[in-house]
Image: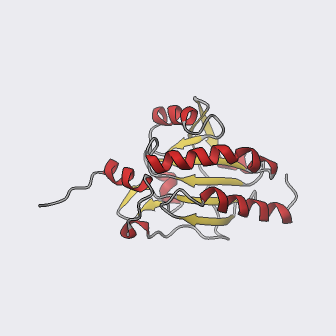
Amino acid sequence: MKLKIVPFAVAATLCAGLSLHALTASATLKPGDAAPDFTTEASLGGKTYKYELADALKKGPVVLYFYPAAFTKGCTIEAHEFAEAVDEYKKYGATVIGVSHDNIDTLTKFSVSECRSKFPVAADPDSKVINAYDAGLPMHASMANRVSYVIAPDGKVIYEYTSLSPDKHVENTMQAVKQWAATHKAP
């Protein structure tokens, strides 16, 4: 019997936080690397707009996290955790944005129900941002792996964390933001 894995099935498995070792390998950007600039369509609180990383960095560090698919178990858990932490990130001058290959209509709903209108989620249906950040799944590069970055206002990556489990992404990026804030005056 031949097993056929369809993209949504892969996303559902990954977003559930299940470990598939063959799918976790990644060549993500590392601290010190320049973060690729991007502009894409995003949604915050059900309203769509043009998101520009360069503009967000003018306000302070950006926590950029990639996730496989909206409305799946692990991705929903992760969105809830980021939503709960947004106010603390703001204390350190940081903002949060999530990116997936989902279309903007799906993310407009996700931004309200799962992100609780606290932070934007960006659509990357052609995977340009995912690929620029080396955040694609090794066996399905158009779909995002679960990768979190912290980008300093100078456009440099200061932290990277990759794990299919939604646990620790908020905790780890918050620690990186706090460490950055301890040595830099917020803009």
Residue 22 against residue 140 in the figure, above or below = below
Q: Residue furthest left?
A: 1
The tally of labels here is: 0
The N terminus lies in quadrant: bottom left
Q: Where in the figure is residue 177, as x and y percent of width and height?
A: 74, 59
Residue 147 vs residue 34, the one in the foreground: 147
Q: Residue furthest right?
A: 185
Q: Is residue 9 left or right of residue 176?
A: left
Q: Quadrant of residue 180?
A: bottom right
Query: Would you place residue 71 above or below residue 168 in this image?
Result: above
Q: Quadrant of residue 139?
A: bottom left
Percent position of residue 17, x then y: 45, 57
Query: Seen in the image, is 89 located left or right of residue 78?
Result: right
Nearest the camera: 91 or 143?
91
Q: Residue at x 34, y 48 (%)?
A: 8
In the rendered image, residue 59, in percent from the top left (x then y), is placed at 78, 47
Picture layout, residue 187 above or below residue 26: above
Residue pictured at 51% horizontal, 45% vertical? 76
